[in-house]
């Protein structure tokens, strides 16, 4: 049943001068072995110049192929080396596999497809291969796809850091905000990460002068990196990070006050939410708290007021509004709110730039959530490069050159 040479020749797309010699099927071992060779006296193109050249010698090679039903399939071939008059002895490329790979291109394409929905550990268990071998496939395809990326039109980027594993280990992610895709990842979170991105941008036909808008948090490292590498860009401080800092200040006021007022205990999330997002129970509690003369309520009102700033479209109106808010904050006699007022003043221009740019890291926060899911599901990565590869696979919107036929 399994010795139909013509059937498998057509199914595998084997063409002259290659030929299928035999097929061995072993049900007990659960595998199918396909043996390929070449016709006697065949000549092959020189890998360097393409000139048909005689065979110098051959070497046996084996590749893992797509399963035949539930059985593992392997291709074995006597791979020739040509002897070119101009270029000497060179290895002929197998039409079914990439040089140096132990898998056929179709098997690799299958792995790439699985990687869109499964972790590498899950894939390794499914196909019966060591995960290290599978990572080599994924790393190669991602590297090749990224090498073809063109950033010549990229002009609006978002920058954010995220943890790569437990402890103080970080990577910095750069996102094309127009295309909602991660275009660069590097280790660390200091200003050198922005230097590294600028160099990578140039290697993909990008020009730092073309970057007109950058969105990031108020990290001094990112601010310095942006100033050093993207002098033409206006930096907008991400409104979510600004409000996060304000929320922290409000919560500090609550913590300071709750030692004198036990009613404030277990109310943290009431002050961090907008009123429309409160539960009925929380709304009732807020109403009762609002009848007290609380410092926390004053801080909360400052927070709600600043939230309105992000809805203003006119630059002059926005500047006037923010100035009044700043004066309110520093005169509040609430030390955490005084400090946040000074913080806003130090980052004034980057916050005001939002009124014109209307960019924020909402897209990046969504991608960051995916990154953390990747890390959690994988339960750790042997090395940082594998982690970055997994992120590019999920969030890089890369185009992979996957085979649609055997040859």
Image (cartoon, rainbow, N blue to C red):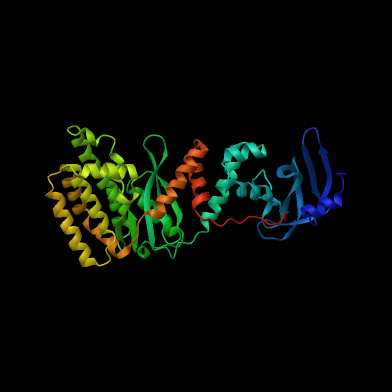
Instruction: In this rendered view, identify the residue nearer to me: 68 or 363.
Output: 363
Q: What residue is shown at x 49% (from left), y 47% (from top)? A: 391
How far from the left and from the top, in percent, is residue 327?
13, 54
Rendering quarter of residue 268: top left
Q: Is residue 37 left or right of residue 383?
A: right
Q: Please tell me whether residue 344 is drawn above or below residue 383 in the rendered image.
A: below
The answer to whether residue 350 of the structure is visible from this angle is no
> Number of callouts in the render?
0
Q: Quadrant of the C terminus?
A: bottom right
Q: Is residue 210 above or below residue 117?
A: below
Up-down relation of residue 366 to residue 285 (above or below): below
Residue 317 vs 325, above or below: the answer is below
Quadrant that contains the N terminus: top right
x and y, in percent, of residue 60 in the image: 75, 42
Residue 28, how many percent across, how many down? 80, 32
In the rendered image, residue 400, in percent from the top left (x then y), is placed at 58, 55
**Residue 267 shows in the view:** yes
Q: Is residue 180 left or right of residue 360?
A: right
Residue for point 63% across, 36% down: 125
Q: Nearer the viewer, residue 137 or 347?
A: 347
């Amino acid at each position: 049943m399994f010795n139909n040479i013509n059937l498998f020749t057509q199914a595998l797309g084997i063409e002259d001068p290659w030929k299928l010699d035999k097929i061995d099927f072993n049900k007990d071992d659960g595998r199918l072995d396909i043996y390929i060779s070449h016709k006697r006296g065949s000549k092959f193109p020189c890998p360097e110049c393409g000139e048909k050249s005689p065979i110098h010698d051959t070497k046996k090679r084996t590749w893992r192929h797509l399963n035949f039903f539930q059985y593992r399939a392997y291709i074995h071939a006597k791979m020739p080396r040509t002897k070119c008059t101009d270029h000497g002895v060179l290895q002929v490329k197998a039409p079914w596999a990439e040089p140096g790979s132990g898998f056929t291109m179709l098997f690799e394409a299958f792995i790439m497809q699985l990687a869109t929905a499964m972790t590498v550990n899950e894939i390794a268990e499914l196909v019966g291969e060591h995960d290290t071998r599978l990572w080599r496939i994924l790393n190669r395809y991602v590297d090749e796809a990224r090498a073809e990326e063109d950033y010549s039109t990229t002009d609006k980027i978002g920058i954010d850091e995220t943890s790569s594993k437990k402890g103080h280990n970080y990577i910095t992610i750069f996102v094309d905000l127009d295309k909602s895709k991660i275009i660069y990842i590097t280790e660390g979170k200091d200003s050198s990460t922005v230097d590294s991105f600028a160099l990578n941008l140039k290697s993909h036909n990008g020009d730092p002068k073309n970057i007109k808008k950058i969105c990031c948090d108020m990290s001094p490292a990112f601010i310095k990196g942006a100033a050093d590498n993207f002098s033409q860009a206006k930096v907008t401080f991400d409104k979510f990070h600004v409000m996060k800092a304000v929320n922290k200040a409000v919560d500090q006021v609550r913590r300071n006050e709750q030692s004198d007022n036990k009613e404030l205990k277990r109310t943290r999330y009431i002050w961090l939410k907008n009123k429309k997002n409160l539960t009925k129970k929380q709304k009732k509690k807020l109403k009762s708290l609002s009848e007290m003369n609380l410092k926390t309520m004053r801080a909360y009102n400052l927070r709600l007021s600043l939230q309105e700033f992000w809805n203003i479209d006119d630059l002059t109106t926005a500047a006037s509004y923010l100035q009044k808010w700043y004066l309110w904050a520093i005169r509040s006699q609430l030390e955490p709110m005084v400090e946040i007022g000074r913080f806003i003043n130090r980052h004034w221009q980057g916050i005001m730039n939002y009124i014109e740019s209307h960019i924020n890291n909402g897209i990046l926060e969504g991608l960051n959530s995916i990154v953390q899911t990747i890390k959690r599901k994988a339960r750790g990565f042997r090395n940082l490069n594998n982690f970055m590869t997994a992120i590019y696979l999920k969030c890089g919107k890369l185009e992979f050159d996957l085979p649609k036929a055997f040859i």
